Image: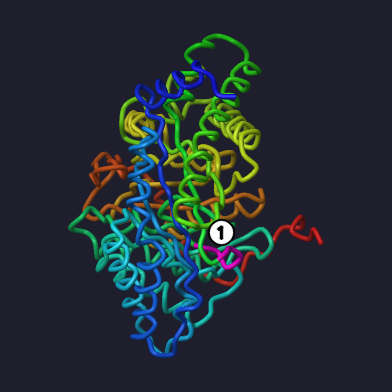
Amino acid sequence: MINEKDILSTIEMIDQQHLDIRTITMGISLLSCCDADPGRACDKIYEKIVRQAANLVKTGEDIEREFGIPIVNKRISVTPMALVAAASETEDYVPFAIAMDRAAKTCGVDFIGGYSALVQKGMTAADERLIRAIPEALDRTDLVCSSVNVGSTKAGINMDAVALMGRIIKETARRTADRDGLGCAKLVVFCNAVEDNPFMAGAFHGVGEAEKVINVGVSGPGVVHHALQSVKGQSFDVVAETVKKTAFRITRMGQLVAQEASRRLDTPFGIVDLSLAPTPAVGDSVARILEEMGLEVCGTHGTTAALALLNDAVKKGGVMASSSVGGLSGAFIPVSEDEGMIAAARSGVLCLDKLEAMTCVCSVGLDMIAVPGDTPAETISAIIADEAAIGMVNCKTTAVRLLPAPGKQVGDTIEMGGLLGSAPVMPVHPQSSESFIARGGRIPAPMHSLKN
């Protein structure tokens, strides 16, 4: 039963500790929009998205006003577009992205995800067409987000796709150079991508999902940071229990909003994704949580252990609060979107290698990291391969969202604004990976993939 203390505590979390619903995301199946005529397919895509999500933004605003809970973003995810476009007799897949963008603007949402391809074991002709269209698609649209899954624990790593994605990321940066390579902030490369992720840029509506569904992403690093301030100097057992109890409270609020949105939109409730997703605002940082555990600067020795504790406790607390926890659920470490991570990177303590180690125990991967604009495509591909290997071997989702900053070198800063924040350009190893990437083929799945 909710009592007065619980209500006042929740008000304090919202008012002073940056607790919010980061996103309400409506997933929409577009499989019924397949058509041999690409023009008709694009018309169907636009019409279905607008019809299904017409009331999404208004509903989110109504809930926000009535419940007093901030809802930062309203988003849409759709069936991986490579699957939908495959039926159309065309070589040009950019119009499908334009149709998505037009529908998103009509609905008034912040982003639309699903300009995606799943190529962990191989690429169809449609997959390759979509991937090669990504740079132009992200250049010509404002709200479209793109993702490509290049590996999985069951299939291994498609190194041909990895090599291609290095070139695609470079070309996307070049085409959006006038915006500090902003297109790359809307492009993520996955291993073990999940079908119910409400967060961008990696959200898509999986083929195993219902016709439409509501997924909610909750975020509360400021709340966790505040809670840990009350247990200074106490053992890690106490730290873990404190994080777990805090995550429970945050998830309960997310479930309330998700169920209410589901009811009002007459759409099945999917999952609550409890991810500690930071923002550039002071007091809303995952890095500061880790430092509250006793680290002088995020990135120093002990950071990986602290992040492992945080991620595990968040998941345990979320599972206690809801039977429908899904998506990614854990702690995100996007450099440009976390003021503590930005500070640690600028100080030189947090480097790319340490971030890679941290991805072994967090929810996603190398996220929103600016690298020099002249970084070779093969180096980017090698970074993707390393991160995919971590995901494949550890049966977890990993991802790469690198920002090759056109014309920028180590020490410079790129500015993207809003939740995307700013990022110091970080160094990469100068030694070449060209011959490694040129091998192509597929890195086989690990032995423990044979679970059947």
Categorize mark 1 by other alpha carbons within 10 Å: few (<14), some (14-19), many (20+): many
> Is there any visible trace of residue 171 in the rendered image?
no
- Residue 389 located left or right of residue 331: right
| Stretch of the chain drawn in magenta | 205-210
Where's the N terminus, which quadrant?
A: top right
Q: Position of residue 119 (x, y in %)?
A: 55, 70
Which residue is rendered at x = 43% and y = 46% of the image? 367
Which residue is more in the foreground, 56 or 18? 56
Which residue is more in the foreground, 257 or 84? 257
What colour scheme does the image use?
rainbow
Q: From this viewpoint, which residue is outermost toward the left?
A: 178
Give the main secondary structure of the magenta stretch. loop
**Quarter of the image holding residue 419?**
top left
Q: Which residue is mark 1?
A: 195
- Residue 189 located left or right of residue 327: left
- Residue 51 located left or right of residue 259: left
Which residue is more in the foreground, 244 or 322? 322
Q: Position of residue 303 (x, y in %)?
A: 52, 28
Q: Position of residue 70 (x, y in %)?
A: 36, 36
Q: Amino acid at mark 1?
A: Glu
Where's the C terminus, which quadrant?
A: bottom right
Residue 209 highlighted magenta (yes or no): yes
> Is there any visible trace of residue 70 in the rendered image?
yes
Q: Position of residue 203 (x, y in %)?
A: 46, 57
Report helix, strand or loop for mark 1. loop
Q: From this viewpoint, which residue is outermost toward the top?
A: 233
Residue 107 highlighted magenta (yes or no): no
Mark count: 1
Which residue is rendered at x = 61% and y = 71% of the image? 121
Which residue is rendered at x = 45% and y = 30% of the image? 221
